[in-house]
Image (cartoon, coloured by chain):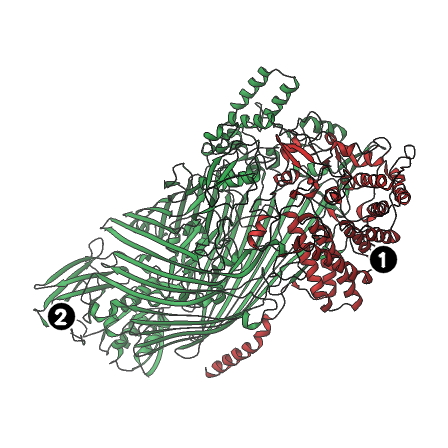
Chain colours: A red, B green
């Protein structure tokens, strides 16, 4: 019996020594981020995460309108309705702002990449640098989107003090959320873009991935917002140098519009993936089109009564339904052409601006209905450019951001007082209204009171 | 000194004064084990030379199977034995052995009782006693008779506290001479009769008693032994707070749902049948459904692979076994994970000292289940059958509006343009019959009068009868149980089989399970080695079909109150859902599949059938190294394999709808193009669980004079691994089991324009592996059987990714003490209290963060982006290096008492708990990328008390009433100033100074002029639901959602062979939200197609300015999210949830032994009839709401109707 006791003791001792290793095994199906390819995988999550841009500003723009009393209005989701009516408060205290939450979720991901990818394993230095640069471009897009929704329009005079958005550059869960000044946010956007440029290929493998073209395109957008029109034009030109194909709508009258990954006009794919059956368009926007010759009218818009779930009777935006892959909000070839044209017009190069517009228009009109647009002055050219932007970028929410920035153009009536009737009440948005800046959801301010609310 | 019975060493040394008490325990144990002894070897072969009598008796016992009863002291003066006999009868050998000894003996059944010859009338009291000083000694005598009045011979009679004992003679008489005046207890025990404890007072005359002994019943022998999973302990010596429920008590409620059987029968444990949850001593986390806040379930010493007592079948296949344990609807089917009839005992370990041995998983208490084992010498066969039936809940209990009110609601929607006229375009969804009339009148197809008369017809038409008859059925549960147990000298066995089937009220649903259990024990090498095995196999199968539930719920498939299932001739009525009947008929003419819906058809389709096989095998070898040291190695292997088959038949509406939507007309060829292959969709999910555990343990059980030390020390490893996968096949043809390969990433054209993709995520494989390593020890020390100390220490380690060992493994410990006051000499002169003990414990239990939170950022991989096809990853959880263990410290003070010869027994516990580093999923700022993060966030303090009192107020020859009252109180409070409560934060959550399960409500300020909610802000100003006022809302604390006071009142009245059991449960002091309207079920925020909310409250909604004076229910026209949210969560709709429920009434009849003896077959036969779900007998709210089944106007939330159960049980 004593022997048995010894044996048991021995087993126990051995067991104790060997067992520590027993529990030091990884869990399955889940592991810590460590390989370079893990970070690439995070950036590949485009449809569910990084490609998503914004949604609610879409409804705030003056191009959206459906008559009061329509089923569309009655069925409208309350938060969309709040955006549509430019209410000072869009989210109740308990709600998350879907746009803000999603953009900052993406921010956490790109910050994780920039924070860790350089120390990851099983990747070459070049790969790591490229992934780092890609994350920077995504981050620039995210901050650009946030600052154009939730902060005052960039104004060189006040940007250093205007509150921008919380500027998080690492996946730190306890950093201060104090809003950085608008200027600082723009500085970061430009810094990220400039640093990323040398590490990226001229054109991407897939258009959801950043490239040099994407960097130039984003630069053009950012400088346009900053009213640095010459720079905007220059970068738009650089982008167009790398990518300039346009879709000739005449080729797709019978259908077969290319899917997103095959769309040659997309430079850097971003999208709205919330399902929109059709977006009701304001008559003023409809009237901008030549309904017989402009194929954008016949292909990209449709009567609400012909679309399931549209619930309104006027014409609505329909381009998103052609391939059902979302509403495209990322920079594209037509937008770059329009930025270049705007820069030219503002610089007084009327001819060059009009030439660009007409290049675009040839791909949009039926050959029979096509005619050249002409302008007698740079001012007239600028008006043509802005109207072309309204036509070309219709239904993407881009108009809302134009409404914000074009208020600075005195002497034009690019932005008028907008009013709309909703469930019997009339809502009005005057130029210069603080409600051109979206409110930050109360929930975030309650959780982190250092976040300052926008003037309401 | 040891007493021996049945080869067991009694657990403690016995000071003389206590001997008699302990003897009774021994007798009791022996009785329990020996009632039906037969089948023994009857001849003895023995050869001994000068062998101590004790050893000889042991030999005799081994060979004969007879039990021996004696005091060790009785053998003290015996002579060694020399004997050589071969194949002699037992009696003869016994006679030879004991012939010349100073002993006398008698054989009762198969037990030899040996007593010292001189015991009778010899005064052996050695302790000086005060009371003996005065008065003349008297004669105490008595006669023992059975219920028929026949004398009982051979009963052991002890007179306490005098150390005197005797036995009754053939006339049933006993006597003690010269008893000094004083208070005494007579303890009378007999092998075939129940023990009697009788207080006697001797004053100044002889006392003569006539005592009737009742035939032995299990009742008294009902386990006083509790199992911690690592060891069994006598409840009388444990320091910790634990409750044991024995098989007999479990059988008083024959329900096949174990939770129902257990509800209310022990204080401190809350069973929530409806949500399938158990809480021991209150809540420790915000989400009570998380396994991390549920008690650990242990079966036969090891954690069970199924950590729920019952399982709720899922509707959709899911690879993740943790998904969904919530009932689909009340009254739906469930499956048991354990066969209730196999359970010998369930022990609830409540405080730290009891549960600390489970270390890192003990913070929420432990439930230890022990299965039945065979008994030596007994071959018993038991057959039981249970049949229970209940009707579907009554439609008339629905808190629903009338048809006319419903049509009125539709009219309001119609008039305000909420619904589009489907005749204007084929793309509009189907509208209701009532709305159709309204549109027809609007278009001028019918006159207003025709419309009104049609609507009048609808408002008088009810579909309740059809729903009841065609979609529902009587719920029936059947249980059949067969078990057999027995054993010989060296082995025992227990075999059982069980079949249970339950069909709930919703048609096309059922659950059935088979259980097979085999438990054996074997002794080898002169009983130095014992081997025990448990084998358990469970097969369960369930079918879930949602057609009936859907028809009774809101939404597209719901039946509006006037929608009929069949016409007058019994033909099914088909309706359009996605599009109007007119539109889909035209599609059908184009070659599309039928596109109409009737729930009766759907009862045949889309059944999710899941089948689960589970095997559990346990093997334990125990070796005796020395008299006091044993070593034990045990291991358990558990395997479970669940297959879920979900065939979405090609004829089901869901599939027809999907296929039709994917069907387009090629205008060039004029042919239909199918985007998805024609046929059904077949989904299969597999979940495999593997769990093994191995344990080595040393047990010490040592007596040193008045000291007793019992100690265990061991180490254990365990791995749990779960893998799951699923597969979807398209174009499935059931007849030939063929399917079509589909690339789910390729877009297909959709009817009406555009494209869609299937985007299957089948390639994901679910995997989880956890490993645990533990070292543990516990020690129990007893002194003079009065003072007990206990301590435990456990060290747990587990595979937590990247966590440093220091943070991963922490020692968890407990200490405790117990003082048995009645065993003190100063307690011997009173005869009110026959048991009084005080317990005090303190200890620490833990809770590991688990996989939901990691200190490192983790990545989930394995999917491809739907457009780019590039593989992508997501961040599972953000790294949080501040994560560590949650620990719960608890202090418990308990008192156990019994009064008046056990007529009243009582236990009381008061405890304090402090949970530190509470793992809490904290609402986080989404600006950081996460809206919830798990942290060791708060500190939670709790305290409570619980008591159980059982009394026998009536006890006569024929009548006996046993009443038990259980009461539990538990409260908790977050004490952490990092979580201040300000007036405007969330409706529930962790806040300093408030309970963790508290809820808050808006202060209601009535409706505004457009019928929308208003509330008060913190300054008392009224806030409008659409105003963007910057002033903050004010949320007033309402109370807790878990009942702080709860318990049960159980009465058992016995008359002869009848017994009537009434179980009443009560829950007090909590609140609930009356969810008559919620944002999810309000017409403005949900779809208008299908069945609308029928809540009666909605009938009183605001309709026009001025209505706000009469009603609080927001109107539809200007409804907004805030308004509905404020209404639903305002103090207007919070109610006191206190209620008392009549849980169960049952009547049982046991056939008298006198009748059974004549049959010569049955040992026992009984029948019972039980009614449960009898409903509420008192409620605090005066609106008739059952707080457990909040009335939403939705049928699937109705409380179940009464359930009737018949049970028959035979043993032979």
x then y, percent, for residue B214? 25, 56
Judging depth in this view, the residue of A58 and B824 nearest the camera is A58
Residue at the (73%, 51%) spot, across then down: A51
Whether residue B837 sits left or right of residue A152 in the image: it is: left
Secondary structure under the numbered disc 2 in the rendered image: helix
| Vertical relation: A144 (above or below) A306 | below
| Vertical relation: B870 (above or below) A18 | above
Q: Can residue B861 be seen in this view?
A: no
Chain at numbered mark 2: B
* Mark whose residue sits in front, 1 or 2: 1
Q: Residues within 10 Å of mark 1 (few under 14, many from 20)?
A: some
x then y, percent, for residue B952? 26, 52
Q: Is residue B275 visible?
A: yes
Q: How far apart are marks 1 and 2 (CA)?
A: 108 Å
Q: Quadrant of the N terminus of chain B?
A: bottom left
Q: Which mark is residue A202?
A: 1
**Residue position for label 2:** B131
x then y, percent, for residue B122? 16, 74
Secondary structure under the numbered disc 1 in the rendered image: loop
Q: How crowded is mark 2: few (under 14 residues within 10 Å), some or many (20 or more)?
A: few
Whether residue A322 sits left or right of residue B480 in the image: it is: right
Whether residue B293 sits left or right of residue A434 in the image: it is: left
Chain at numbered mark 1: A
Judging depth in this view, the residue of B1189 and B202 nearest the camera is B1189
Judging depth in this view, the residue of B616 and B1070 nearest the camera is B1070
């Amino acid at each position: 019996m004593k022997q048995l006791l010894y044996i048991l003791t021995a087993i126990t001792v051995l067991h104790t020594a060997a067992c520590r290793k027993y529990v030091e095994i990884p869990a399955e199906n889940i592991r810590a981020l460590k390989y370079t390819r893990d970070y690439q995988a995070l950036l590949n999550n485009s449809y569910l995460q990084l490609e998503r841009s914004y949604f609610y500003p879409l409804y705030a723009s003056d191009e959206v309108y459906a008559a009061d009393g329509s089923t569309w209005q009655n069925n409208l989701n309350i938060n969309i309705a709040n955006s549509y009516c430019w209410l000072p408060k869009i989210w109740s205290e308990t709600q998350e702002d879907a746009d803000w939450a999603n953009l900052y979720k993406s921010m956490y991901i790109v910050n994780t990449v920039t924070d860790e990818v350089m120390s990851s394993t099983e990747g070459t230095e070049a790969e790591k640098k490229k992934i780092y640069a890609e994350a920077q471009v995504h981050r620039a897009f995210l901050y650009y989107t946030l600052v154009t929704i939730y902060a005052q329009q960039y104004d060189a005079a006040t940007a250093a003090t205007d509150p921008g958005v919380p500027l998080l550059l690492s996946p730190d869960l306890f950093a201060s959320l104090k809003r950085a000044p608008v200027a600082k946010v723009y500085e970061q956007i430009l810094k990220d873009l400039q640093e990323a440029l040398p590490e990226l290929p001229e054109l991407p493998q897939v258009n959801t991935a950043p490239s040099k073209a994407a960097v130039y395109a984003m630069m053009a957008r950012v400088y346009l917002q900053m009213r640095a029109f010459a720079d905007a034009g220059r970068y738009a030109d650089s982008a167009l140098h790398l990518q300039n194909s346009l879709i000739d709508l005449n080729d797709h009258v019978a259908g077969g519009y290319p899917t997103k990954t095959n769309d040659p006009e997309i430079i850097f794919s971003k999208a709205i993936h919330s399902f929109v059956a059709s977006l009701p368009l304001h008559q003023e926007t409809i009237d901008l089109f030549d309904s017989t010759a402009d194929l954008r009218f016949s292909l990209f818009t449709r009567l609400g009564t012909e679309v399931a779930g549209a619930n309104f009777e006027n014409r609505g935006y329909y381009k998103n339904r052609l391939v059902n892959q979302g509403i495209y909000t990322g920079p594209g070839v037509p937008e770059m052409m329009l930025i270049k044209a705007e820069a030219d017009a503002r610089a007084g190069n009327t001819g060059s601006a009009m030439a660009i517009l007409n290049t675009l228009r040839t791909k949009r009109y039926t050959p029979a209905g096509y005619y050249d647009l002409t302008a007698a002055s740079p001012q007239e050219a600028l008006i043509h450019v802005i109207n072309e932007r309204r036509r070309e970028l219709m239904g993407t929410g881009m108009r809302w951001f134009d409404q914000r920035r074009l208020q600075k153009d005195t002497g034009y009536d690019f932005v008028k007082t907008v009013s709309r009737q909703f469930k019997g009440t009339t809502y009005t948005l005057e130029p210069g209204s603080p409600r051109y800046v979206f409110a930050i959801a109360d929930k975030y301010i309650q959780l982190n009171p250092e976040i300052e609310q926008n003037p309401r | 000194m040891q007493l021996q019975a049945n080869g067991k060493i009694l657990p403690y040394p016995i000071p003389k004064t206590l001997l008699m008490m302990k003897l009774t325990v021994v007798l009791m144990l022996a009785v329990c084990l020996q009632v039906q002894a037969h089948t023994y070897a009857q001849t003895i072969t023995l050869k001994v030379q000068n062998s101590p009598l004790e050893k000889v008796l042991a030999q005799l016992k081994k060979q004969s199977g007879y039990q021996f009863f004696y005091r060790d002291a009785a053998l003290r003066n015996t002579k060694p034995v020399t004997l050589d006999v071969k194949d002699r009868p037992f009696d003869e050998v016994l006679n030879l052995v004991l012939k010349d000894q100073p002993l006398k003996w008698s054989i009762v059944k198969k037990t030899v009782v040996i007593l010292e010859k001189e015991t009778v009338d010899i005064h052996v009291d050695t302790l000086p006693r005060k009371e003996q000083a005065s008065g003349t000694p008297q004669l105490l005598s008595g006669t023992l008779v059975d219920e028929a009045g026949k004398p009982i011979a051979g009963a052991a009679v002890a007179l306490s506290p005098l150390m005197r004992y005797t036995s009754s003679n053939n006339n049933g008489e006993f006597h003690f001479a010269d008893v000094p005046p004083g208070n005494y207890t007579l303890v009378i025990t007999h092998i075939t009769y129940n023990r009697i404890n009788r207080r006697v007072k001797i004053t100044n005359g002889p006392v003569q008693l006539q005592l009737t002994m009742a035939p032995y019943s299990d009742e008294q022998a009902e386990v006083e032994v509790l199992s911690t999973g690592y060891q069994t302990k006598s409840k009388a010596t444990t320091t910790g707070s634990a409750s044991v429920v024995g098989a007999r008590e479990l059988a008083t409620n024959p329900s096949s749902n174990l939770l129902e059987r257990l509800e209310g029968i022990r204080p401190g444990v809350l069973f929530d049948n409806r949500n399938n949850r158990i809480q021991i001593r209150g809540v420790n986390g915000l989400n009570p459904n998380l396994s991390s806040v549920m008690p650990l379930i242990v079966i036969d010493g090891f954690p069970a692979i199924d950590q729920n007592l019952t399982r709720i079948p899922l509707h959709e296949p899911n690879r993740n076994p943790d998904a969904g344990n919530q009932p689909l609807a009340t009254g739906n089917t469930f499956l048991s994970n354990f066969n209730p009839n196999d359970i010998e005992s369930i022990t609830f370990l409540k405080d730290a000292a009891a549960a600390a041995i489970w270390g890192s998983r003990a913070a929420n208490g432990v439930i230890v289940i022990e299965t039945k084992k065979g008994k030596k010498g007994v071959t018993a066969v038991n057959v039981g059958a249970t049949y229970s039936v209940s009707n579907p809940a009554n439609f008339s209990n629905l808190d629903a509006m009338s048809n006319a009110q419903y049509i009125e609601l539709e009219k309001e929607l119609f008039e305000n343009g909420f619904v589009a006229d489907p005749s204007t375009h084929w793309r509009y969804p189907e509208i209701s019959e009532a709305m159709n009339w309204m549109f027809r009148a609007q278009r001028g197809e019918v006159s207003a009068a025709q419309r009104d008369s049609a609507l009048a017809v609808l408002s008088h038409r009810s579909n309740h009868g059809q729903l009841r008859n065609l979609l529902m059925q009587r719920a029936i549960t059947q249980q059949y149980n067969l078990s057999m147990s027995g054993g010989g000298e060296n082995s025992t066995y227990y075999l059982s089989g069980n079949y249970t089937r339950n069909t709930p009220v919703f048609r096309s649903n059922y659950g059935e399970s088979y259980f097979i259990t085999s438990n054996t024990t074997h002794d080898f090498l002169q009983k130095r080695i014992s081997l025990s095995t448990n084998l358990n196999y469970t097969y369960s199968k369930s079918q879930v079909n949602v057609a009936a539930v859907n028809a009774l719920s809101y939404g597209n498939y719901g039946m509006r109150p006037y929608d009929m299932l069949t016409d007058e001739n019994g033909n099914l009525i088909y309706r359009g859902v996605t599009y109007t009947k007119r539109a889909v008929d035209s599609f059908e003419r184009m070659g599309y599949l039928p596109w109409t819906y009737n729930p009766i058809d759907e009862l045949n389709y889309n059944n999710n059938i899941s089948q689960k096989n589970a095997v559990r095998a346990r093997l334990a070898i125990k070796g005796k190294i020395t008299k006091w040291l044993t070593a034990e190695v045990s291991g358990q292997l558990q395997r479970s394999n669940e297959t879920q088959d979900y065939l979405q038949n090609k004829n089901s509406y869901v599939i027809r709808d999907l296929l039709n939507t994917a069907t387009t007309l090629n205008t060039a060829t004029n042919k239909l193009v199918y985007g998805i292959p024609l046929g059904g969709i077949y989904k299969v999910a597999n979940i495999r669980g593997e769990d093994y555990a191995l344990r080595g343990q040393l047990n010490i059980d040592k007596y040193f004079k008045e000291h007793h030390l019992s100690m265990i020390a061991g180490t254990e490893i365990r791995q749990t691994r779960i893998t799951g996968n699923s597969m979807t096949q398209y174009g499935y043809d059931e007849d030939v089991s063929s399917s079509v390969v589909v690339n789910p990433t390729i877009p297909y054209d959709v009817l009406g324009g555009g494209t869609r993709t299937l985007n299957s995520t089948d390639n994901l494989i679910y995997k989880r592996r956890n490993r645990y390593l533990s070292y543990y020890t516990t020690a129990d020390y007893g002194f003079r059987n009065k003072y007990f100390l206990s301590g435990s220490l456990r060290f747990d380690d587990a595979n937590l990714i990247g966590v440093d060992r220091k943070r991963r493994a922490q020692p968890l410990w407990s200490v405790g003490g117990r003082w048995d006051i009645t065993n003190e000499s100063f307690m011997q002169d009173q005869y009110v209290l026959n048991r009084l003990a005080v317990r005090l414990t303190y200890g620490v239990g833990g809770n590991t963060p688990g996989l939901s939170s990691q200190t490192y950022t983790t990545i989930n991989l394995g999917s491809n982006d739907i457009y780019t096809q590039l593989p992508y990853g997501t961040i599972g959880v953000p790294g949080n290096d501040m994560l560590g263990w949650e620990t719960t410290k608890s202090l418990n003070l308990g008192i156990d008492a019994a009064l008046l010869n056990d007529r009243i027994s009582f236990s009381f516990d008061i405890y304090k708990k402090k949970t530190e580093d509470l793992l809490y999923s904290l609402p986080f700022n989404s600006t950081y990328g996460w809206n919830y993060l798990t942290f060791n966030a708060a500190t939670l303090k709790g305290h409570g008390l619980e008591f159980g009192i059982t009394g026998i107020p009536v006890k006569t020859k024929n009548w006996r009433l046993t009443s038990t009252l259980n009461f539990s109180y538990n409260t908790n409070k977050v004490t952490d100033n990092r979580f201040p409560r300000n007036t405007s934060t969330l409706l529930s959550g962790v806040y300093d100074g408030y309970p963790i399960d508290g809820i808050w409500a808006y202060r209601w300020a009535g409706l505004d002029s457009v019928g929308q909610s208003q509330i008060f802000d913190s300054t008392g100003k009224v806030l409008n639901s659409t105003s963007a006022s910057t002033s903050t809302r004010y949320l007033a604390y309402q109370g807790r959602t878990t009942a702080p006071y709860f318990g049960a009142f159980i009465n058992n009245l016995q008359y002869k062979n009848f017994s009537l059991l009434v179980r009443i449960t009560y829950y007090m002091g909590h609140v609930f939200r009356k969810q008559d309207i919620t944002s999810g079920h309000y017409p403005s925020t949900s779809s208008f197609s299908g069945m609308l909310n029928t809540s009666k409250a909605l009938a009183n909604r605001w309709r026009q300015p001025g209505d706000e004076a009469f009603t609080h229910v927001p109107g539809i026209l200007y409804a907004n999210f805030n308004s509905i949210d404020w209404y639903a969560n305002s103090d207007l709709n919070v109610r006191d949830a206190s209620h008392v429920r009549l849980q169960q009434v049952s009547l049982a009849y046991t056939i008298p032994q006198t009748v059974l003896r004549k049959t010569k077959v049955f040992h026992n036969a009984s029948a019972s009839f039980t009614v449960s779900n009898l409903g509420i007998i008192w409620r605090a709210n005066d609106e008739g709401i059952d707080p457990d089944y909040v009335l939403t106007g939705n049928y699937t939330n109705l409380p179940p109707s009464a359930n009737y159960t018949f049970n028959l049980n035979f043993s032979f």
